[in-house]
Image: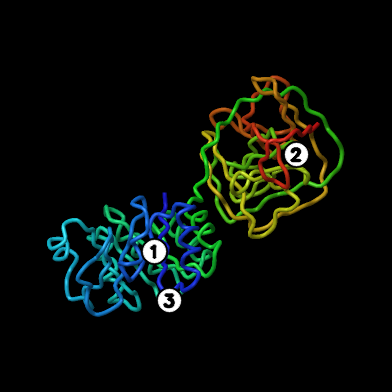
Amino acid sequence: MKMSWLDIRGLGEAKEAILQEALHYRVEAVVADDPADFAELPPTLSKVLLPQGEKLPEDFGDATIVVVDPARHGATTAELALRHPGVEFGRFVEIVDAATLEDACESARTERWSLLLFRDPTKIPLEIVIAAAARSTGSLITVAGDVEEAEIIFGVLEHGSDGVMMAPAAVGETAKLKAAAQADTPQLELVRLKVTATAHVGMGERACVDTCTYFREDEGILVGSHSKGMILCVSETHPLPYMPTRPFRVNAGAIHSYTLSKDERTNYLSELQSGSKVMAVDVKGNTRLVTVGRVKIESRPLISIDAVAPDGRTVNLILQDDWHVRVLGPDGVVLNSTELKPGDTVLGYLPSEDRHVGYPIDEFCLEK
């Protein structure tokens, strides 16, 4: 779980409303420069004191973590911990050049908490610090200017910073920061579906989803004609006789089809575009979000595949009618769509909720 630290310094009149939002969305910590700001906060919230002056305050109040700059405050975190055994200490580092980058790496390796402010927009210095902290037990908190930057920071080097500190510009941004911190995708329970029928259904438009990511051989995206049943379509990672592999692509299905995206929301293949997110899924149900680079929609002959789940629920998928378009079976078996026949087993997913504009909703909805 990534941490959200809310910086309330200098918020002015909006401070109280933003604090209430922070409590509602259960951010991990509130950051202030005055211990008095912690007086009314509940014990479930970490209270981070970030002193601004040259001298540390005599009393840390209810602060649970105090972040200091040893060069400015004249004391190391180890010295302060001896004087204040009930308080955790962290180190603040502002990275502006090679020397301060090395300071940040040293802090990441040795400190319980490292609060990092990168002045340059490039994320390469953060990558270096994350790599330096690979075997550390401490936590890296990186300052973000806005939610969009926070999302990037959480994903740097696939590991990301352990947390982000951000000063919200308005009410509502705390909720967005917390959502960005919780962007891990869920484990899905895939089921074995028995093919019951296939049919050549003529011409139509199908979508190839080209992503900005290499898929693994046992990975693809879930696609289906109905929101309550999808089949796992494999990427073009497996060799073909007439063309090179394209491990970033899933020949996904007809344009009306659903696929899963962020927050388990469904999207039509037809509405995906550059920058959209889709959920990559492997045969064990592990998931991750990948970014769409482009969607190619072209007119092709189509094949319809019907399948049934062990509980009797039915699933339909319409694909390009060509043997090189494939789906996945148990244990990652690759199955050519045109060779599927009744009795074959494919992997799929059965969402329990109906959908309204892609969002899960508990209502009556008949799809056929």
Image side of residue 302 versus residue 208, left or right: right
- Tell me the CA gap for discs 1 and 3: 13 Å
Dividing the picture into quadrants, the one containing residue 280 is top right
Residue underneath mark 2: 319
Labels 2 and 1: the sequence-earlier one:
1
Labels 3 and 2: the sequence-earlier one:
3
| Residue drawn at x 84%, y 44% as measured from the top left | 204
Amino acid at circle 2:
Leu
Image side of residue 4 versus residue 284, left or right: left
Crowd band around label 1 with a 10 angstrom C-alpha radius: few (<14), some (14–19), many (20+): some
| Residue drawn at x 49%, y 52% as measured from the top left | 24
Across and down, in percent, residue 317 comes to 74, 35
Across and down, in percent, residue 275 comes to 63, 59
- The vertical placement of 149 against 196, above or below, is below
Residue underneath mark 1: 127
As drawn, the residue found furthest toward the right would be 202
